[in-house]
Image: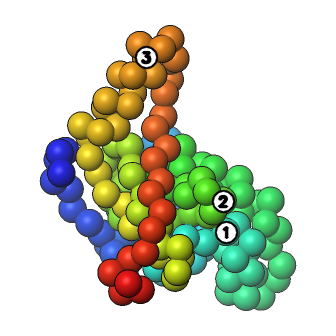
């Protein structure tokens, strides 16, 4: 795959990298944002705002509205802490929040697992084709559906 090598974070390392990346973007790492990110990071499959609101509500001992979680998730996507799986309206924590590039998702129709791969040649070609067609500020959204190795 074309692109660059980056460090994949997990656990406390991921939370620390996310906090640093968010603060570097001029945003605050609040307790609520930390709770939403931790709930997202512990999932191995894409999660909806409703799933995350339920998890954070249980953690905090009081109801957290999905709309509040959506706003935080929008911030996380904008600042590269999370990725949105468009076809599922769900989110995944970005395991390398310091790297900015477009992402290609492979989504299993059987178990719902989503894996991302990076191929800057492919996403670069899509951006170039869109620019040739007169589009600006292009953000490729590439999702491939199929069956993962564990389910085949």
Q: Which mark is residue 48?
A: 1
Are the residues flagged by discs 1 and 3 in contact, CB closer than 8 Å? no
Secondary element type, mark 3: helix
Residue receiving disc 3: 131
Q: How is the image coloured?
A: rainbow
Nearest the viewer among 8 and 27 is 8
Quarter of the image for the C terminus: give it. bottom left
Residue at image point 75% right, 72% down: 50
Residue at image point 39% right, 27% down: 127
Cα–Cα span, label 2 and label 3: 26 Å
Residue 91 image point, x, y percent: 57, 63
Classify 137 as above or below 43.
above
Secondary element type, mark 2: loop
Q: Is residue 114 visible?
A: no
Of badges 1 and 2, the one in the foreground is: 2
Residue 123 image point, x, y percent: 34, 37
Cα–Cα span, label 1 and label 3: 32 Å
């Amino acid at each position: 795959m074309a692109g660059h090598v980056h460090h994949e974070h997990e656990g406390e390392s991921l939370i620390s990298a996310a906090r640093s990346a968010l603060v570097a973007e001029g945003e605050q790492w609040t307790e609520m944002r930390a709770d939403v990110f931790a709930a997202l990071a512990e999932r191995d499959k894409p999660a909806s705002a409703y799933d995350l609101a339920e998890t954070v509500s249980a953690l905090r001992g009081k109801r957290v509205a999905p709309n509040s979680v959506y706003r935080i998730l929008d911030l996380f996507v904008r600042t590269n802490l999370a990725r949105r799986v468009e076809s599922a309206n769900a989110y995944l924590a970005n395991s390398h929040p310091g790297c900015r590039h477009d992402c290609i998702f492979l989504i299993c129709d059987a178990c719902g697992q989503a894996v991302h791969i990076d191929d800057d040649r492919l996403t670069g070609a899509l951006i170039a084709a869109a620019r040739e067609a007169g589009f600006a500020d292009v953000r490729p959204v590439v999702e491939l559906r199929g069956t993962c190795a564990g389910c085949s």
